[in-house]
Amino acid sequence: METPYRVALVAFPGVRAFDVSVITEVWGVDRTDRGAPAFDLRRVATDTAPIPMRGGLALHPDRTLAWLSHADLILIPGLDDHLTPAPGPVLDALRRAHARGTTLAALCGGAFTLAQAGLLDGRRAITHWNLVDLLRTHHPEVTVVPDALFIEDDNIWTAAGTAAGIDLCLHLVRTAHGAETAATIARSMVTAPFRTGTQAQFIERPTPHTDRDADTLAAVREHALRHLHEPITVADLAAHAGMSPRSLTRHFTAETGTTPLRWLLDQRLAAAQKLLERTDLPMSEVARRAGFGSEVTMRQHFASRLATSPRAYRAAFSTGSATGGSSPIAR
């Protein structure tokens, strides 16, 4: 029997209930009946005494910090008060875990905990857009990236605020277990399996006047997804929207936080991942259906964006039960 993927939620007084809930929803629900792998989520603290949280809630640890040596992934929730000092034993345990090569991931203000441990010194990190200046002020050794949804540096992941923690958790699932597993969990949570763009789209700013742009761009994206297997240019999308290419790019980036070409590439990669997991189609056909045009182009994008090859991805994540006829991507 395969050993479940072991996930540790590190807790101490001051952690946010929302982030604890996100971690628990993604990693703590048994979805093996829907094809997802088994996860072993443990709530880890200095001892097993209940930890109070806001709203009258309490977290009951079931393991002490010693269990971190068994974990495949260690998750640090955000904080109600972002300058809350973490207990010394927690910081020491996180340092040891990173030295062992264990993946660490912090949600929202959890980046402050990693920074307290010195683990972000000289590394890139992100937090909620409203906390970027605070992180820079209190931890000037950290290279704070202002607008990512999540970011990785030396096997340490950090995420932007609140819902970006969901994005990061699903991305970590996708990285370890494939796009189909992440999509299964996302469907059960009624959320998108991945979002494109940056948190720049959520930074507080005056609300624009209502116009046709939002509906128009939604229709453009729907059109692109229906024709993903065909060559698509920004000029094509602009013509479909009745805009100039420059105007489309400006409105598209403002709404989604990414450019039309970057968005298209994300969709093509997602389509190729699904085909590699669900079908035994030849690589050239996967590339064609996902809109890459050639296997060489697809391989280049897999290497640059996913740090793997299509063949290696299929070997790691193929369900082994689907055939080319079941593909949801246009033939």
Image: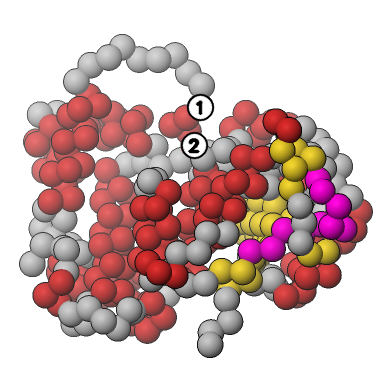
For badge 1, the amino acid type reads Ile
Circles 2 and 1 in contact, beta carbons < 8 Å: yes
Identify the residue under disc 2: 199
- Tell me which residue sits at (57%, 38%) in the image: 162
The residues tagged by marks 2 and 1 sit, at their Cα atoms, a distance apart of 7 Å
The image position of residue 327, as x and y in percent, is: 16, 69
Q: What residue occupies the far bottom of the structure in this picture?
A: 1
Label 2 element class? helix
**Which image quarter: residue 91?**
bottom right
**Which image quarter: residue 252?**
top left
- Residue 39 in sight: yes
Q: Is residue 47 magenta?
A: yes
- Tell me which residue sits at (34%, 31%) in the image: 255
Q: Magenta part of the protein: which range?
A: 41-51
Q: In this picture, is 193 found above or below 127?
A: below
**Which image quarter: residue 316?**
bottom left
- Tell me which residue sits at (23%, 16%) in the image: 211
Q: Is residue 331 magenta?
A: no
The image position of residue 236, as x and y in percent, is: 11, 43
Label 1 element class? loop
